[in-house]
Image: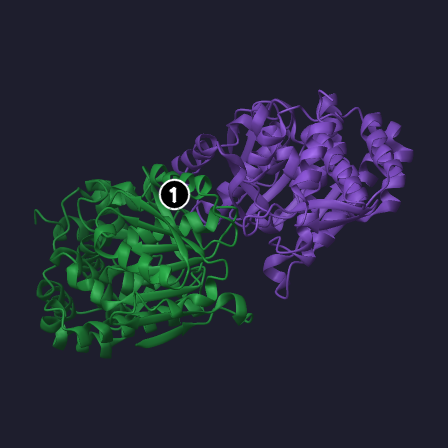
Chain colours: A green, B purple
């Protein structure tokens, strides 16, 4: 098992937390015992994950005399909304969960975002622990404290920065992950390489076949290096006033795709892959990276079996949806672009023509 | 004008904020200009307050070239729920409010709690400014960062600790406050005297007639001394892990009353008054204060024209509803009791008999 510590500020007792990464650590309750003085937790999961891992976690907890309240949600990005969040509140209240009762998220990014936002706001905040079971959640969404729900007008528009007390990423849970979700997770792994870690990117290229084959050691290494990257960025800028925005490479386009097609139609990682190609194409048009770089990026995603052609929504629709982006400041869209492979920058001066040209030439009908 | 600074921790730039208290300061926009670099704000208010003060604030902002998006909610505690919160999100999104656009609450406690929770969670947090227009909001709810909404199963069950950047309490807005709401605000003023400031309590007793007559100087002094008390408590314990719970004197009973009768039937301050009498009676039965003390407390509330007899819901109903209290820990109800007048304590060892006897003997039918 490997452990990374996320140090958030000068008061480490409250704000630093460990990310444990390893094989079959789901049932190692000693990793979180310090957060269970009351011997009771609520476990938020979904209808897909519950049959696979809920009983394993519950019985491990029971062996330590920890009672658990299971809360099973419907599965899918289209349920990441207030109605589903309210199912969690109803269950927490009905079961009289208290301020000292931790909420555990057992599942992928949607479960983590919902459970985290519920933990942030139930009784104005209760302890929160992440057990991510998808690759995307293990390498990205379970770390860093972003929680929230979608709004009909935009993705992740309502939420909170709320850090977990611990993250336990058990790589064996990836054995049951559908192929498509494995690939979607790889999209976020590639992201770290592109924005800040070209050595990692080269490693990903060399190890893509093993990643797709779910080689346990390669998976753990990929999760570890991804989390280390994420932790460094979040430590530097918890609330996204600066460098943290770089983690959104491909996300401004990606969120527009997810929203336009209906949440859940494309997986988040798929939309990010296609969105990153658009960001790369835009970077090239801004004179930042070369055509060779764009082709290298495209071929990594192709290797991963991810979509590289964004749907043709028409430039107007893209621009309208991207105007809702959380990074918009003083009416200006801000894009994450690539200065070079391994170095992303925030750019608020993208000319309208470069954007329109990219959207016209690089979406699916082209 | 008087100003109190709330200092929350070692990084004052982010976390300390001023409470300005004075006459006709609603239109002194210079008090908040530092928070308006983008020249745009959203103003959350309600159908009662909007006709009285919205245009005054908007035109004062306009004189400083600050545009404002008005968001007008229905008025009443019964609207402090997710549906109303969502009206705010819809308006913020439709008007493309950004991370840098502050949300101003212009109204009483309900408006402040809703607007504050919206500010805490819209785009995972935008700047928040309070313009409280009721006595209750000026002396209590606008200070300290508690925001939230009610849930059918309990009051303020969903929310966040989210501090405003500034509080501007204009005492002239109290001229239009209905008599009943003025009295409800006095309930929270009395609370500070009871829990930690016996000198202030004696001052309140001497000045009750002037308070009820809305004597401007006496009102400002009462608001100032209340906010100073609140600020001291919040500075010591922002997230209510200790001493802040004392501010809930009468609230455990009071919330049960509000919930049982339907939100909005009794005003919050009215429920707190009757709840405080129950807390005082319970304190006496626990051997903490004398019958003379209880009578003194009762006569203060009578003087203020507040209800001193809690409704007879039956002990079971009270106990059931109080079991949902946020202060419950390890299944034990915790009560705020009076050690003496001017000194409250948290008590988790109240015998069931003392509680049942108090509820049987001291609710309205008795």
Percent from the top left, x then y, of residue B210? 87, 29
Q: Is residue B159 visible?
A: yes
Q: Which residue is mark 1?
A: A88
Q: Quadrant of the N terminus of chain A?
A: bottom left
- Image position of B28 with respect to A14: above or below: above
At label 1, counting other C-alpha atoms closer than 10 Å, the crowd grade (few under 14, some 14-19, many 20 or more) is many
- Image position of A200 with respect to B129: above or below: below
Does residue B64 appear left or right of residue B196 in this picture? left
The residue at the far right in this view is: B206
Q: Is residue B134 visible?
A: no
Does residue B241 appear left or right of residue B364 in this picture? left
- Image position of B66 with respect to A302: above or below: above
The residue at the far front in this view is: B353
Regarding mark 1 in the picture, which secondary structure is present there? helix
Residue at position x 74%, y 45% in the image: B337
Question: Depth check: B285 or B159 in front?
Answer: B285
Question: Depth check: A22 or A187 in front?
Answer: A22
Does residue B267 appear left or right of residue A153 in this picture? right
- Which chain's residue wears label 1? A
Residue at position x 21%, y 67% in the image: A172
Quarter of image, res A291: bottom left
Percent from the top left, x then y, of residue B299? 85, 29
Does residue A85 appear left or right of residue A121 in this picture? left
The residue at the far top in this view is: B365
Question: Depth check: A283 or B166 in front?
Answer: B166
Percent from the top left, x then y, of residue A226? 28, 70
Quarter of image, res B366: top right
Percent from the top left, x then y, of residue B49? 62, 26
């Amino acid at each position: 098992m490997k452990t990374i510590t996320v140090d958030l500020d000068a008061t480490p007792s409250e704000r630093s937390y460990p990310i444990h990464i390893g094989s079959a650590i789901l049932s190692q309750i000693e990793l979180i015992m310090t957060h269970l003085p009351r011997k009771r937790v609520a476990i938020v999961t979904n209808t897909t994950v519950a049959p696979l891992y809920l009983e394993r976690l519950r019985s491990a907890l029971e062996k330590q005399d920890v009672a658990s309240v299971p809360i099973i949600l419907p599965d899918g990005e289209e349920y990441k909304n207030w109605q589903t969040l309210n199912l969690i509140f109803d269950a927490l209240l009905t079961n009289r969960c208290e301020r000292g009762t931790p909420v555990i998220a057992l599942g992928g990014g949607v479960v983590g975002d919902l459970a985290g936002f519920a933990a942030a706001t139930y009784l104005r905040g209760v302890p929160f622990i992440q057990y991510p079971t998808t690759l995307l959640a293990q390498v990205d969404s379970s770390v860093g404290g972003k929680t929230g729900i979608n709004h009909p007008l935009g993705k992740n528009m309502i939420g909170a920065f709320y850090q977990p007390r611990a993250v336990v990423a058990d790589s064996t849970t990836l054995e049951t992950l559908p192929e498509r979700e494995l690939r979607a997770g790889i999209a976020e792994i590639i992201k770290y390489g592109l924005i800040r870690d070209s050595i990692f990117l080269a490693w990903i290229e060399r190890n893509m076949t093993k990643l797709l084959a779910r080689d346990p050691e390669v998976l753990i290494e990929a999760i570890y290096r991804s989390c280390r990257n994420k932790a460094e960025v979040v430590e530097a800028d918890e609330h996204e006033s600066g460098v943290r925005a770089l983690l959104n490479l491909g996300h401004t386009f990606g969120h527009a795709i997810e929203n336009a097609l209906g949440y859940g139609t494309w997986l988040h990682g798929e939309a990010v892959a296609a969105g990153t190609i658009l960001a790369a194409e835009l970077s090239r048009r801004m004179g930042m990276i070369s055509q060779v770089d764009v082709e290298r990026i495209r071929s990594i995603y192709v290797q991963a079996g991810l979509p590289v052609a964004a749907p043709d929504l028409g430039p107007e629709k893209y621009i309208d949806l991207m105007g809702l982006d959380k990074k918009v400041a003083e009416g200006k869209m801000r894009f994450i672009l690539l200065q070079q492979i391994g170095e992303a920058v925030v750019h608020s001066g993208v000319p309208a023509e470069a954007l329109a040209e990219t959207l016209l030439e690089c979406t699916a009908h082209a």
